[in-house]
Amino acid sequence: MPENHIARAFDRDLETIQALIMKMGGLVEAAILDSAKALKKRDESLADRVRDNDRLIDNLEEEVNVEAARMIALRQPAAMDLRTILTVMKIAGNLERIGDYAKNLAKRTTVLVQMQPIEGASGAIRRMSKEVEQMLKDALDAYMRRDVVLAEDVRQRDHDVDQMYNALFREFLTFMMEDPRNITACMHLHFIAKNIERMGDHVTNIAEQVIYLVTGEMPSDTRPKATELIAATDDGEI
């Protein structure tokens, strides 16, 4: 088979898999914003839609992985082409995890709507979510444009998300100390904020994969991380 025909076939396959990534990214961006909107508006039906739509994100990740495996088996890509396929698979994995965190946020929203709202918390969480969503949009743009400068900018902005998380944690501590009746709601809100901070970490992973794709090397310096005030983890379910 002529080499130019093989190259054209690979390019068509790559366009297909990149279209899946962009579709997946759009769904994840919507999940981030909708989960935060559901919390602010105390909208259980919107929270339920976020949870239901997570299946679409999971299905797309599986489709990306199947297509990527097929490309590796049939095209036997080398060097840059192989790096591109591996990068796509890692981006899909990070998108799937971000979607999971958005789903967890939505699940906690259905609990929080039964409680007295904490003043200012939902607005602050929505602002944090918007920052992460914009980072994700920029990271995906950086991938499509192979833009190392934009990817590095996304990477640096993760520090801002960490600072927003730390500020929220301080506020929740204050509310809990002022009135013990706020403890349960503030704990749920804290884990929501932690989920969003973790979303930022996964977006940063995507940006670092873009840098690796273009340069062949992962960033050598440790990315900036604001000092966390609590060693909480909330990767799972309520």
Image (spheres, rainbow, N blue to C red):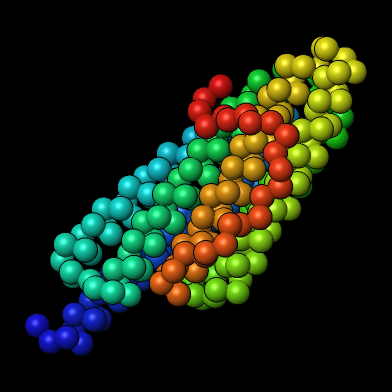
Q: How many marks?
A: 0
In the depicted view, which residue is nearer to us: 133 or 89? Answer: 89
* On-image quarter of the C terminus: top right
Residue 34 visible in the current orientation: no
Identify the residue at horizontal 82%, vertical 12% (top origin): 181
Horizontal side of residue 167 vs 159, given as left or right: right
Left or right relative to 3: residue 108:
right
**Vertical side of 186 occupied by 24: above or below:** below
Q: Residue furthest front?
A: 221
Relative image position of residue 30 (x, y in whole percent)? 59, 49
Residue 110, by quadrant, is: top right
84 to 174, vertically: above or below = below
- Outermost residue to the left: 1
**Farthest right residue?**
178
The picture places residue 121, in percent across and down from the top left corner, at 80, 34
Relative vertical location of residue 67 with respect to residue 98 in this rendering, above or below: below
Instruction: Left or right? Give the position of 236 relative to 5.
Output: right
